[in-house]
Amino acid sequence: MTRHVAALVVGGGISGLVCAFALRKAGIDAQLVETSPRPGGVINSVIRDGFLLELGPQSFSATAQLHQLCEDLGISDQIVQAPPRAPRYVLIGDELQPVPLTPPAFFMSSLINGSTKWALLRDILGKSTPPDGDESVASFVRRKFSAQLLDRLVGPLVSGIYAGDPERLSIRSAFPQLYEAEKVAGSILRGMLRLAKTRKGPRGRPTLQTFREGNQTLASAISRKLGAALFAQTSVTEIVKRSDGSFEVRLDVNGRQESLTAQSLVMTTPTDVTGKLLVQLDSQFESLLGSV
């Protein structure tokens, strides 16, 4: 007999894990399938020769929602905060150069050239208009400031937090405050100040955090909570839309063929993978998602 679930989440990266956990917390019978034997996606912490190494994102930005998730998972006591005054460095050529951490240090630093510094001053005094469509983090920084700022500061920051490519990360999704600031004021600084005045509730200072045993702590904790609702080494091979609106999903479970029906389907796989799976429902999906 084909088993039935209320919701099937496809993809066991952090988005899929959190989605499945939230659905089950809300009382919805959600199950998650992940192709690899290790859930967590790009989040991967390993210990080698006594050192903790992050093979994916090295830290995360503290938010109220993430703090609540850690409380629900019972791992809040494992969070450690990056010292705000600790020096940061970027590798330029074969030399480590200090990252300026204050506005005066930034404008005195030799890390960034004069034209880039002028572009930041121009943003404070001038006005720009964001494009109608979404744009990447890289495109945003080059348009507003310079390629040098992207390569030397923004790129390393993005890779450290998202383990992602700034050329492919959406500015609206990754840094919505920056997008909104330009939208409302034409300037990041003036826009951030304007948005801060309208924000309700306590204002916490943004901090970078991680877990004492590495970022894998979060993915592992969610995996334990999901328990038998998480199926690793399980690939989706076909998706069929049924006449009643539900989905029949055919699976490869470590070489064994199975199927289930799901009333709702949540795709958290990379867009190109999602496109290849959903092309069976609509031929346009592959071309639309493959270019994202």
Image: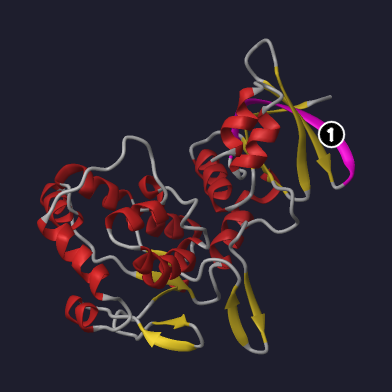
Closest to the observer, 248 or 125: 125
Q: Nearer the viewer, residue 180 or 207?
A: 180
Residue 280 x/y as whole percent:
71, 24
Find disc 1 in the rendering and name its residue.
258
**Span colored in magenta:** 255-267
Residue found at x 58% / y 35%: 289
Q: Is residue 127 magenta?
A: no
Q: Secondary structure at mark 1?
A: strand
Image quarter for residue 32? top right
Residue type, mark 1 in image: Glu
Vertical arrangement, residue 174 with respect to residue 115, above or below: above
Residue at 51%, 58% (x, y): give it: 165
Instruction: Give the image quarter of residue 246.
Output: top right
Dot 1, crowdedness within 10 Å: few (<14), some or many (≥20)? some
Q: Quadrant of the N terminus?
A: top right
Q: Is 44 rendered above or below residue 129?
A: below
Image position of 283 with respect to 102: above or below: above
Which residue corresponds to the image point at 24% horizontal and 66% vertical from the top-left? 205
Q: Residue furthest right?
A: 256
Q: Is residue 242 left or right of residue 75?
A: right
Seen in the image, is 88 located left or right of residue 36? left
Residue 23: percent from the left, percent from the top? 52, 38
Which residue does the image show at 51% across and 87% down from the upper left?
A: 94
